Structures are given as C-alpha cells and as structure tokens.
C-alpha cells in the first residue's frame, strides 16, 4: 500500500501499572506511561476511586429498584468513612455521629431548609443545588451530596471536618461579603478530597486564561472566569504588598461567586496538597488552617495572611492538561 496504516494504542487506568508505580512511589507524579512504540497507558484515576464510584452506582441502581420514589439512598456511611480517613491523615480522628446526608431525591430536605433559613439564604442554597455543589450546613448538621461520586463525597467529608475543627456553627451566605470565606472553605475541601483521590486535578490560572480566550466561552459563562482571575490578581497584589485594584469586578449573577470560589479554592487546595506531599507544609500548619475561625469579623485579614504562605508554595503544574 502507498501509505502504511499507523496504529496508536492508548490504554487507561491499568491497575497493574498503577500498583507498580505505587511500589516506586511514583503514583502521584506519573500520569502517562509509555508501554512501547505508539502504545501508552493513561493513569488519571486511582483504582480505589473507580471501585468506590462503581459501588455507589450499584447502590443507587439497586436501591432505586427496591424503593418507591419517596425514599432516598443514605450515603452517610460513605461520607463518615471519608471523614475518618481525612481526619486521621491529619492526626486527629473525628467521628460524625451528628451528620445526616441528603441528596436531591430527599423530599424532606427542602422542608428542613425552609424551616430554618430566610428567602435570601434559600436563594443561595438553591443556587448551590442548581450548580451541583456538595455542601455542609453546620446549623442543621446536614450534608448535601450533589452527585454520588467519590470526589463529591470526599469534598463533603472535608467540609464537615473543616466546620468541626473551625467550630463553625453558621453558614456563610452573604455574598460578596463572605466571598473570601467561600474560597477558603472550597480550598480546604479540595485539599481533603485530594487525600482521597490524589489524581484529581483542577484548573490553573493558565487554564482560566485559555478558557476566556476560547470561542466556545461567551456571555455570562465568562463571568465566573473573569471574577476568579480578578480575585487571583487581588490575592497576588495583597501578598506582595502592592496597592490593590481600585475597581472591583462585580458580576451580574450571584452564582458567579459560587463558581469562581470553587475555581480559586481548587487552585489553593492543589498547592496545599502538592506541598503537603512534598513535606514543604507540615500537618501542624494544615491543621492551623483548618482551625482558623471562619466566624471572626476580621477573617479577611487572616485570609490574606494565610494566602501569603500558600502563594509561596510551588504550583504542582502549569496546566491540568500539560501531562496528558
């Protein structure tokens, strides 16, 4: 034939290869393994994350077949297990006997929320649910699991640990006043989720800039990205003792704060976890971050003091796509 057909083989998440890397302590730094000419294996999910996700899927499918529409699956045991793993990793085991976990299928969830929160607070909770955010409500000891996946369950578990260790007894729904608190909560939650799934990756500043210049991102979809980049610039200027930006970026949609907080929290959590794994950040410093009282009036000052430490840590990667 005039042209010889070239075959490229890409395998994904081989358990045998993963455990070989684990023996060499390379499981966190290697994402692609070359098996031979034009043959590679992509490793972007640890084996136990696959197993747990499948177990949750089986439970959901099995329970939906058994129960009527008014019943919901109880994921409390999964969350409790992750709470135990995360808290033990940081040297202080935590039980969660008071925790109740709900999903969107729970008929009684909204009634409980309506009985406790005002219309403005309910609107924020509704936005959280619409944007598929998993969150913890200290006032009611309620956890909301947006999706039955390991990442969401681990995020919820980390938010529970953070609330308990910081002695938070209220939620922070006043936006933009509580925006920095939201970033902090999301950042430590992302760190906790990485304890469970170290292969998880977040967007970086380079990814945000690339998304903003992409033709596929238009209109209101750009707003959270612009807010995240603006706040990132504020953080960098604050920690370098430069004058902060005079004109704050004010998004039209409150949900933009939610999405931007998640993006910025992911970047923060990625740095924390990378430094922790490389022993550049001690357990003591991490637990002091988790115990920082969120309810203090001067939290914003404390936020920038802590960000000065975090921004000095090395970024694990320039873009989440660079190792692919």
Image: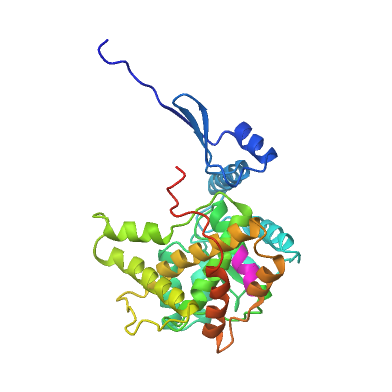
Indicate left or right for 125 with 313 as reference. Answer: left
Magenta region includes residue 270 = no
Question: Which residue is depicted at the point 37% across and 60% down?
Answer: 208
Counting from the top left corner in percent of width and height, residue 46 is at 59, 43
In this picture, is 129 found above or below 40? below
Counting from the top left corner in percent of width and height, residue 211 is at 32, 57
Q: Is residue 102 visible?
A: no
* Between 48 and 305, the one nearer to me in the picture: 305
Q: Which residues are magenta?
A: 158-163
In this picture, is 321 found above or below 265? above
Indicate left or right for 252 with 189 as reference. Answer: left
The C terminus sits in image quarter: top left
User: Where on the picture, by quarter, is residue 260?
Assistant: bottom left
Magenta region includes residue 162 = yes
User: Where on the picture, by quarter, is residue 206?
Assistant: bottom left
In this picture, is 61 found above or below 89? above
Question: Which residue is depicted at the point 50% across and 74% down?
Answer: 182
Indicate left or right for 149 with 176 as reference. Answer: right
* Between 14 and 147, the one nearer to me in the picture: 14
Counting from the top left corner in percent of width and height, residue 285 is at 67, 71
* Between 125 and 279, the one nearer to me in the picture: 279
């Amino acid at each position: 034939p005039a042209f010889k057909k070239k075959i490229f083989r890409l395998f994904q998440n081989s358990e045998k290869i993963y455990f070989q890397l684990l023996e060499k302590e390379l499981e966190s730094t290697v994402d692609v393994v070359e098996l031979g000419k034009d043959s590679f294996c992509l490793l972007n999910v640890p084996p136990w994350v696959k197993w747990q996700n499948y177990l949750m899927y089986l439970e959901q499918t099995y329970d939906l077949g058994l129960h009527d529409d008014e019943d919901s699956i109880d994921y409390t045991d999964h969350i409790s297990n992750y709470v135990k793993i995360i808290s033990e990793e940081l040297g202080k085991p935590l039980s969660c006997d008071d925790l109740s976990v709900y999903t969107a299928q729970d008929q009684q969830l909204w009634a409980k929320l309506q009985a406790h929160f005002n219309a403005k607070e309910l609107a924020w909770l509704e936005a959280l649910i619409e944007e598929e955010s998993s969150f913890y409500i200290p006032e009611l000891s309620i956890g909301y699991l947006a999706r039955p996946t390991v990442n969401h369950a681990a995020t919820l578990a980390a938010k529970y640990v953070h609330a308990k260790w910081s002695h938070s007894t209220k939620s922070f729904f006043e936006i933009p006043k509580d925006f920095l608190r939201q970033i902090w909560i999301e950042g430590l939650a992302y760190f906790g989720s990485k304890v469970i799934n170290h292969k998880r990756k977040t967007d970086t500043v380079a990814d945000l800039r690339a998304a903003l210049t992409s033709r596929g991102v238009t209109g209101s979809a750009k707003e959270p990205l612009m807010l995240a980049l603006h706040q990132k610039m504020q953080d960098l200027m604050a920690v370098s003792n430069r004058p902060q930006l005079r004109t704050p970026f004010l998004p039209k949609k409150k949900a933009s704060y939610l999405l931007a907080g998640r993006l910025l929290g992911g970047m923060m959590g990625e740095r924390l976890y990378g430094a922790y794994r490389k022993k550049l950040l001690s357990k003591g410093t991490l637990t002091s971050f988790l115990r920082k009282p969120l309810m203090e009036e001067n939290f914003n000052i404390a936020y920038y003091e802590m960000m000065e430490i975090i921004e000095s840590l090395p970024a694990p990667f320039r873009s989440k796509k660079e190792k692919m």
